[in-house]
Each structure stands twice: as structure tokens, then as C-alpha cells.
Amino acid sequence: MEHFYKIIIDWSLERFGPYEDYFTPEMLARASVEDFDSLFAAYGDDPDALPDTYPVGKGQVRLAFFAPCYDEATTMKDLLERFLPPEASVFIEEGEITLFPRRIPFIGDIQILLGEEVKPLPQEKAIRLWGSQIFGTGEHATTRLMAEMMESFNFSGKRGIDAGAGSCILTLYALMKGAQDLYAFDVADNFRETAGHVMTLNKARFHAFQEDHLAFSARYTRWKETDFLLANMLPRYLFPVLALFAEKLSSRTYVLLSGIPEGRRKEAEAFFDRTGFTVTQSFQHEEWAGYTGFIAGRRPGTEL
């Protein structure tokens, strides 16, 4: 991890006009720009998907510049305050940034090797990831929670689906644990490329599809022969996946779910009940909840 300082400007388009009038193209090329309207169009009203502490509101934009040390950050902040409107909010945020490539302890004695440059040591148990900007490096609490849930399941010779596979870290972990026939899908723009890279790096093979759950469900034909389903995703994405897949999977399919914020446990459990997902065990890691169980079938007369 590397320390950094971020100089943040919260910008109101209604009050200050276009931010492009104040910043040169060269400056904007160095900035991170997030506008609420675009995020809202992408995520809808999901309270868990928008960035924490984001200035929520129509026409709100957050610009951020990065500095390697505090002195440079304060100098940059002072300069920005001189030419920006006096009412514009400019402040410094301190944090850490992930470095690539590197080794990450995962679960047990397994290491995540992030980046093609990181070579496995002799006899090392390792999952090699490409290092692209796609979710799933093994550090996020939901990924670790899912790995802990997977640890006790017998994957040997099993067929399964990894929904919202991201970096394919859970797909590869299932293969490491003996799974033989894996189907992974994700809507990320670089998922097909990511899957191809990690297959080569790990000398592994699985079926990878760059598409959403609707397209995947129309393609997939082995529902009744599916032994397990992995789904590590926020409720906004998980609920539609589970609702559709619950109509197709066998009652013997073992389902492992992660990505439920603690504050949405009751909502999730009510949804599981309507969907026909019978929870056999629940888990907690930091502020995230996970569940394992089976599809028992939707109760007659219930609606999602």
C-alpha cells in the first residue's frame, strides 16, 4: 500500500456552471471526475452502490486531484482556492492506494499473486490474477467472506456457476478445490479479456461469458445438473439473479451468497423467503453478511 493525499472539489453545476470553464484540459486529464447524474443513471436508487460520503444531489460533481505528500497537497489546495468560486468546497483527504503487482494472503496458506509479473514460488499454493481494474483482489471483506464460506464445501468433481465473477478469483478458488466444470459470467467491459488472462496464468479452463444474468440464463442448459452457485454481489444485482435462477436450479444446488450489507439483512432474508431460498447458515465479516442454503421453491401465492 502507498500513502496518498487527495484534493477534493465538490462542484455544483447550478451554482458555478460547467467546471470545464475553470480547469484546462491538461488539469482535467490528471483529475478523477464523478458526477452524480451519471452515477445515478448507472446505479439507480441503490443506497449501497453510490460512493460513501458522496455529495448526493442533481447536478453535483466531485473532482479529485492526487498528491504524493502533504506539502504538495496543501500547495495545490491553496492554488485551487485562489481561482475557484469562494463558495466551492475544497478539502484534503488522506488515504492509501493499492500497488500492483504484489502478493496478498488469501485464505489458509493460499496467496493471491496480483499481476502477471508476480511469479509463484516453488510449492506455493497460489491464485494468479491479471491485475486489471476489476473487482476481486481477495482483499475486500465480501470476497474473504465468500472464501470462508467455500472452505467447508466439497467442490471435488462438481459443476457450478459463478455469477458476477469479476476477476474470477472465486472461480479459480473453486477449481483449486476440485471443481471440474465452471461457468462464470460478468457484465464488465473487460471480463472476457480478464478470464482469458487468468486461465492462461493458472493453466485452468472454465466457461466465461461477458453478459448479464438474462443472457446467461438463456444460454445455459445444465440447470438441473448444477451442484453449486456462487454469487458475491450487492443486493441490486443479487436479487434479480437469485429470483431468475431460483426458477431453474435444482433443489440440491448448494447456493453461496455474499455482498449483503448488515443494514439490509432483514430485507434480504424477506426476499429469500419469497424466492424460496432456504438458508442453512448465515455468516458475518465486518459489515457484510453471507448465506448458504438451497432453493426449496417459491411458496404458492407469493410475489417478488
Image (cartoon, helix red, strand yellow):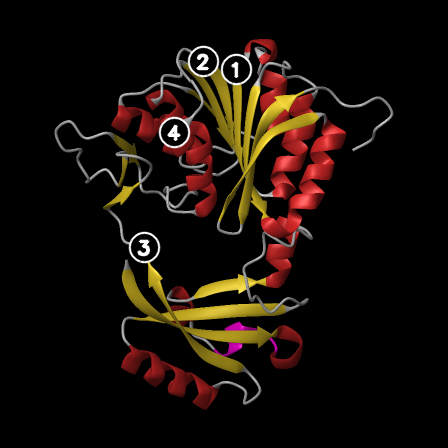
The earlier-in-sequence mark between 4 and 3 is 3
Residue 227 - label: 1
Tell me: 127 left or right of 42.
left
For residue 110, say whether it is visible. yes
Label 1 sits on a secondary structure element that is: loop
Dot in front, 4 or 2: 2
Tell me: 130 left or right of 191.
left
Q: Residue at x 46, y 35 (%)?
A: 146
Residue 20 among those drawn in magenta = yes
Whether residue 225 is situated above or below residue 152 in the rendered picture: above
Which residue in the protein does label 3 denote? 98
Label 3 sits on a secondary structure element that is: loop
Tell me: 178 left or right of 232.
left
**Mark 3 vs mark 2, CA separation in Å:** 34 Å
Which amino acid type corresponds to the residue marked 4 in the rendered image? Ala
Q: Residues within 10 Å of mark 3 (few under 14, many from 20)?
A: few
The quadrant in which the C terminus is found is: top right
Which residue in the protein does label 4 denote? 195
**Mark 2 vs mark 1, CA separation in Å:** 6 Å
**Mark 1 vs mark 3, CA separation in Å:** 35 Å
Q: Residues within 10 Å of mark 1 (few under 14, many from 20)?
A: many
Which amino acid type corresponds to the residue marked 2 in the rendered image? Lys
Q: Where does the magenta region start and end?
A: 17-22
- Residue 220 at x, y percent in the picture: 57, 16
